[in-house]
Image (cartoon, rainbow, N blue to C red):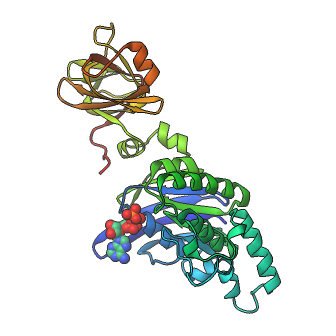
Amino acid sequence: MSIAVRNISKHFGAFHALDNVSIDIPSGELVALLGPSGCGKTTLLRIIAGLESVDQGQILLEGDDASDRHVREREVGFVFQHYALFRHMTVFDNVAFGLRVKPRKFRPSEAEIRKRVTRLLELVQLGWLADRFPSQLSGGQRQRIALARALAVEPKVLLLDEPFGALDAKVRKELRRWLRQLHDEIHVTSVFVTHDQEEALEVSDRVVLMNKGQVEQIGAPHEVYDHPATPFVASFLGSVNLFHGRVEDGHLHVGEHALQVGGEHDATDAAIGFVRPHEFDLLPANAPGSGLPARIQRVIAIGPLAQVELTRHNGELLEVSILRDSLAVLGLREGDEVSVRPRHIRVFNNNEKLAA
Ligand SMILES: Nc1ncnc2c1ncn2[C@@H]1O[C@H](COP(=O)(O)OP(=O)(O)OP(=O)(O)O)[C@@H](O)[C@H]1O
């Protein structure tokens, strides 16, 4: 089922939680709502579900205005951060619950319920846990059961609010891969709230970047990462180094240094350049060509990569990420003076809003 969010605004008292938000989600897509804490992700999810009223705007489900449709009639499945399983019921009974409480005329037979629950437990790869109670499961297993339970009533839309937020990093990573595979099998239109950019980029077909109640950008993970539309998106997705300067003749002038920028940029006295840590070359200080002089303060080994912390001569910090092998070949160490050269700079006018 497709979802269209049309010009939704929502206040809580004087606080503007959502400000004219519009998003089109085609049927079968997995979309991540991504943004910092308090930007309105959960509020939007609850509005789609029909759990929250709006001041203005509409939610269209499969093209029809859902404003007057009660939560139960919207055919949405919900999975929350904190597994809301019934503690006194087995895994099997938890998954069967939504089917058993259906009004008699819509309720499948007990044999049909058994068949469906067994199939769902296989889908979430936990059939062997059917007779256990929630307290006998790991956090990751509980979330998979919560998902099976949400899917049991065959929702047209699946809404997930930080479903892996309470789990440790390794389990989280496994589960998000698993969620992606599951979605590829069942193709139910899904909206997934997260404040973890890696999770959003890895799992979703498209990412909706939200900031202070507004949508900043919507796009495929590689689009929003490679072509951020605003300074907020550039700084929210991954680490970045910032350079303040002026643009003239295809260069960003940072103090007395000129760094080449690709593409067309109007001359401006107030620009910000964004460079990701892996988009720099490090060269010995006396290497010919343009670059920013800096000193290596610290080298942190993270697997095959070296995270290099540098200080520019004006005291500003830079973070560069390169292969440890490359650093060894260059013979660079802590305390060395180097020339730092961005390979790619994204330039914005300084009057555009930045991440909070
Ligand atoms: N029932 C409410 N009454 C008053 N303010 C609310 C209510 N629900 C949410 N808010 C406020 O609206 C803003 C958006 O909240 P929301 O839960 O949608 O944010 P979020 O992006 O999901 O954040 P998080 O990632 O921290 O969950 C927050 O500032 C929050 O304090």
Q: Which x, y percent locates residue 34? A: 46, 55
Relative to 354, does residue 38 appear above or below in the rendering? Answer: below
- 94 on left or right of 51: right
Q: Residue at x 57, y 72 (%)?
A: 136
Q: Residue at x 72, y 61 (%)?
A: 186
In the foreground, 95 or 293: 95
Q: Taking the image as drawn, is residue 335 in sight?
A: yes
Q: Which x, y percent locates residue 278? A: 42, 29
Q: Quadrant of ligand 1?
A: bottom left
Q: Taking the image as drawn, is residue 61 in sight?
A: no
Relative to 72, does residue 162 appear above or below in the rendering? Answer: above
In the foreground, 117 or 271: 117
Q: Which x, y percent locates residue 193? A: 49, 61
Q: Residue at x 41, y 42 (%)?
A: 238
Q: Residue at x 70, y 54 (%)?
A: 184
- 241 on left or right of 31: left
Residue that lies at the very extreme toward the right in this rendered image: 111
